Amino acid sequence: MQRIKWLLWHGNGHRARQHADNLRDDAKALDLNYLHLAKFARSVQEFAVYIRSNAGSLINYGERFRAGERISSAMAESTVNAVVSKRFAKRQQMQWTRRGAHLLLQTRTRALDGTLRPLFERWYPGLANDNYGDTASKQAAAA
């Protein structure tokens, strides 16, 4: 596990995936009289699948650290946690459902990474696009 953690920290998804698969295979091969062995093996399997699914988006934090770049998203995460926690509070007048919060966070993420507008333009090709200074679109919208 320590080796996998080190590989993940340094952005080496391929080798981390190999080690996670080896750990999964070792957990499956264990023949112990341990009450929670099945739960452990399932957790290791889920961990290996998670690494395999997210290997392409790993960030090399070791390289960023050496370059003096920020490596923490704690401030953003704590803000999100505070907002979400407040909306899930029982005494709050307006509450979110889990599905509603999930959809809102997906929408906000798309807005921040710049993929929301292209998605809407693909869904609604006739959408007036007047944010890019296109005078023809502005004139058509005004008419």
Image (cartoon, rainbow, N blue to C red):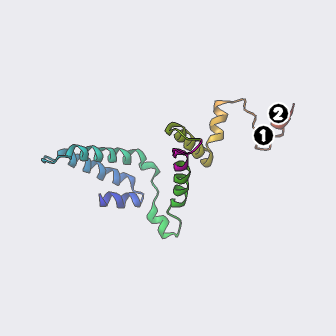
Task: Look at the image and give the residue range highlighted in magenta.
Answer: 85-93
Which of 120/16 is in front? 120
Indicate which disc residue 130 carries.
Answer: 1
From the viewer's perspective, is 58 left or right of 24?
Answer: right
Discs 2, 1 touching: Cβ within 8 Å: yes
Which of 101/32 is in front? 101
The picture places residue 58, in percent across and down from the top left corner, at: 45, 53
Q: Is 86 covered by the magenta stretch?
A: yes
Q: Quadrant of the N terminus?
A: bottom left
Task: Look at the picture and state if 93 lies above or below 8.
Answer: above
Q: At 45% from the left edge and 62% from the top edge, which residue is drawn?
A: 61
Q: Secondary structure at mark 2?
A: helix
> Total label count?
2
Q: At 21% from the left edge and 49% from the top edge, which residue is drawn?
A: 26
Residue bearing mark 2:
141
Q: Amino acid at mark 2?
A: Ala
Task: Look at the picture and state if 28 lies above or below 65.
Answer: above
Q: Amino acid at mark 1?
A: Asp
Q: Secondary structure at mark 1?
A: loop
Q: Quadrant of the C terminus?
A: top right
From the viewer's perspective, is 28 left or right of 51?
Answer: left
Q: Is 4 covered by the magenta stretch?
A: no
Q: Earlier in the sequence, mark 2 or mark 1?
A: 1
The picture places residue 123, in percent across and down from the top left corner, at: 64, 30
Indicate which disc residue 17 carries.
Answer: none
Q: Residues within 10 Å of mark 2 (few under 14, many from 20)?
A: few
Which of 23/105 is in front? 105
